[in-house]
Amino acid sequence: MPLTLNNQNLHQLPAHIKVPEYNRETLKPGIVHVGVGGFHRSHEAFYTDNYMSETGDTQWGICGVGLREGDRKLKQCLEQQDYLYSLLIKHPDGQSDVQVIGCLTDFLIGPDNPAAVIETMAASDTKIVSLTITEGGYNFNPATGEFDFSNPDVKHDIAHPESPRLVFGYLAAALKLRRDRNQKPFTVQSCDNIQHNGHVTQKMLTSYISAFDEELADWVSTNVCFPNAMVDRITPATTPAVIDELQECGIDDAWPVTCEPFHQWVIEDSFSTGRPGWERCGAQLVDDVTPYETMKIRLLNAGHTVLGISGSLHGYSTIDETVSDPLFARFLRMFMDTEATPVLQPVPGIDLSAYKDTLLTRFSNPNIKDHLSRICSESSSKFATFLVPTIKENLASGGSVHCAAFIVAAWCRYSYSGKDQHGNPLEIIDVQASKLKQFATLSKDEPLIFLRQKEIFGELAEYPAFAKLYAGFLSQLNNDASVAAIIQAIATSSQAAHA
């Protein structure tokens, strides 16, 4: 019978399961993490757990924080398991490794007790407050890059600083306490897929604070470190099959995490009051993370979007299923080779051709089953970050934009039809879903109206060459041309152009 995962049973688990090699009773919460989703648990927590197992340095426990009601179920599951959880690492050859992660110390729900969250962030043991809050959580206008003060939650937080709803309210209140107590500030560390994520976090936080306390904003700008970082590990949503597989391995875990074996973390070494030695466990500490994060965002993340939107419309359900189709694999490689790579700067120590080969191998891992609905979730944020900058740079340099124009048109069709090309319903997960559907529906009569959402696309509609390509692809999709036929035509045209 599988053993329930908890402290009592930890050292009775089967010998092939890796467990923490440090004394959990001595853990101190040196890190407070906002957004304890699957990716955090397969990435930052994984690195931190491995570091503590290697060194025995237990001052870097992680206190999780959830700011949404939807976080409560995970809190309850982890609480019942003494904050232990299993990481199921699935290799392409079908082999799996199981590691129990033990670095979590607590899980606080912000709306239940905002003061407790603020005080935990402000505590002297806390050296880092890290974030995985998704692109939308940073509350900036993608077209302008400025903080969105029109958000009702922002207005609430400014009026009620003692009970904030957004992460910026919590950070502001905790940093104010640190300053008022004459303590050094904690580092604010973004672990999200946003280019220059540290700079973005700093800009959004100081913009927010400036609205009501210029002196505190100046102190934060001067004293708080916001290291940029590039993060990478494919981490699909947990399914009942993952729970069942772990039970066969001997663990009863209510909410495990599954991921690929590949992991990468490139971090600028800029911290206010210390950090774990993550480089001992595979992280890269560098002076400038820009070329690494640009490479990852414009190849891996954009590649996910290319496959996710086109594969969903075609009728596929997972990334590995999509990329196993030679036509879609060819289309992805064409996008990476002819549109993304030409506008990338050299990346120190990285062979871009080999990196792209690795991406195709990772995407095709049949044991990950990363669902396209997850890949396409919050596309309103992802397009602006992952795809639009590449399009704009190619338009400026005279480069190709055919693949990207088709994907934007396919997203429009995806947004209003809500069905694949076989009539099956699509699961669309996006805070902007209703607005996207409204503009996409109007585009049947006014093709460019979807493209004129400036907060996503900026001025792309004003580039005649791109607008013409986009409108042509949208017309084909609206006239029931198949995704596969359009992709084949783009590939054939590209091959002829480069012959």
Image (spheres, rainbow, N blue to C red):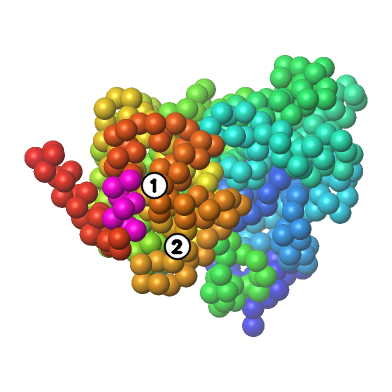
Above or below residue 218? Residue 176 is below
Q: Secondary structure at mark 1?
A: helix
| Dot 1 alpha-carbon crowd within 10 angstroms: few under 14, some 14 to 19, many 20 or more | many
Name, please, the residue furthest toward the front. 445
Q: Which mark is residue 161?
A: none
- Residue 495, given in percent of the width and then of the height, sits at 14, 45
Measuring from the top left, give residue 390's x and y in whole percent: 38, 34
Residue 320 showing in the rendered view: no
Q: Position of residue 373 (x, y in %)?
A: 49, 61
Q: Is residue 367 magenta?
A: no
| Direction from residue 194 to residue 172 in the image, left or right | right
Amino acid carrying label 1: it is Pro
- Horizontal side, residue 165 vs residue 487: left or right: right
Q: Nearer the viewer, mark 2 or mark 1?
A: 1
The N terminus, quarter of image: bottom right
Q: Residue at x 56, y 70 (%)?
A: 239
Q: Which residues are magenta?
A: 471-478
- Label 2: few (<14), some or many (≥20) within 10 Å? some
In depth, the one of 326 and 397 nearer the eye is 397
Vertical comparison of 321 with 410: above or below: below
Who's the residue at 56% across and 55% down the image?
Answer: 433
On the image, numbered disc 2 is attached to which residue? 417
Q: Quadrant of the C terminus?
A: top left
Magenta span: predominant SS is helix
**Is residue 475 part of the magenta span, yes or no?**
yes
- Secondary structure under the numbered disc 2 in the rendered image: helix
Residue 123 lies, with reference to residue 476, above or below; the image says above
Q: Which residue is mark 1?
A: 447
Looking at the image, residue 159 sits to the left or right of residue 276; the answer is right
